[in-house]
Image: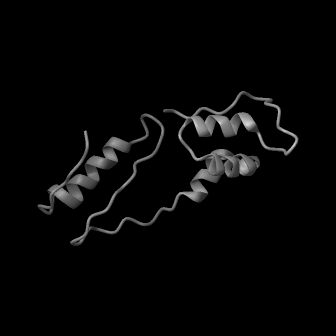
Amino acid sequence: MAIQGPAQGTAKAASGIDESLVQTLSDAEMSAEFAREIAIAGGKGVVLELIRRIPSAEFVPLQAESRTLAFIGHPGRGKTTSLVKVAVRCGLGTGTAIAGKG
């Protein structure tokens, strides 16, 4: 489900929280508590606040372990290309098995 922000000029509740944003995030299966935290921090920008909260790390080549990678972004921004590069570099190029859900 795509997350789309509320309309411009949305009225905020007396608490200062944009309840329509909380509802939009909740409808996208975000927990109500987390959605409320994001809405409170919304003055900084919702996208920037989400980026701040999603941990990321420098890519380190796989050894004998497995890991899950998330490719997040707008359409046409290179997610599929990046996935192929990772598969070639870490899987196909080294003989490591690559499993995925299609």
Q: Position of residue 30 (x, y in %)?
A: 56, 44
| Residue 58 visible to an observer of this rendering | yes
Which residue ends up furthest to the bottom in the rendered image?
63
Which residue ends up furthest to the left in the rendered image?
95
Q: Is residue 75 above or below residue 32?
A: above
In-front residue for pair 24/88:
24
The image's colouring method is one colour
Residue under the point 40% across and 48% down:
71
Residue under the point 23% across and 58% down:
89
Q: In the rendered image, which quarter is residue 75 located in?
A: top left
In-front residue for pair 44/6:
6
Horizontal relation, residue 61 to residue 39: left or right: left
Horizontal relation, residue 57 to residue 18: left or right: left
Residue under the point 69% across and 37% down:
21
Q: Position of residue 27 (x, y in %)?
A: 58, 34
Which residue ends up furthest to the top in the rendered image?
7
Q: Position of residue 82 (x, y in %)?
A: 33, 48
Q: Position of residue 14 (x, y in %)?
A: 88, 41
| Residue 44 visible to an observer of this rendering | no
In-front residue for pair 48/7:
7
Q: Is residue 20 above or below residue 16?
A: above
Residue under the point 79% across and 43% down:
17
In-front residue for pair 31/18:
31
Which residue ends up furthest to the front in the rendered image?
32
